[in-house]
Amino acid sequence: MGRFFPLMNKSVYQWARKHQLHNDKAFMRFLDGQLLISAQTTSKSTAALYGATALDLPRQGIYEVEGGIGNLAKTLVTAIERYGGKVQF
């Protein structure tokens, strides 16, 4: 865990700058493009540790809820009501 401490308060951009990658316009454009897909922001606004996991998304793969996100909501409502809860829309 200790080796990650230097990244705790750094952005992906600062991490790239530390390794002298920030001047490579094509690389930074690629990095920002990948982060826009996975983190919905660019290297200057993405925390380095979060960015590391976000950039690993294509390797990790993504998960989806069977039947879509609406099905997840319906399942939650059903469970809440089954246990006496009330859901208001």
Image (tube, grey):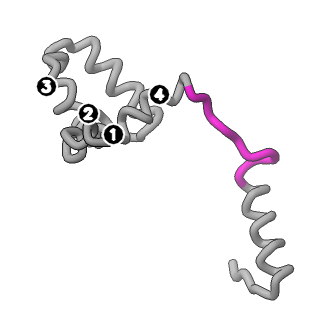
Q: Which residue is mark 4?
A: 56
Dominant SS of magenta comes to: loop
* Nearer to us in this view, 6 or 85: 6
Mark 1 or mark 3: whose residue is earlier in sequence: 3
**Foreground residue, 74 or 14?**
14
Specify the segment rendered in magenta: 60-69
Can you identify the residue that label 2 sits on? 12
Q: Looking at the picture, how far across and down is residue 86, in whole percent?
A: 75, 85
Rendered-image quadrant of the C terminus: bottom right
Residue 61's disc number: none
Q: Residues within 10 Å of mark 4 (few under 14, many from 20)?
A: few
First in residue order: circle 4 vs circle 1: 1
Nearer the observer, 10 or 73: 10
Q: Nearer the viewer, mark 2 or mark 3?
A: 3
Outermost right residue:
82
Secondary structure under the numbered disc 2 in the rendered image: helix
Q: Which residue is mark 1?
A: 49
Amino acid type of the residue that numbered disc 4 sits on in the rendered structure: Asp
- Name the residue type under label 3: Lys
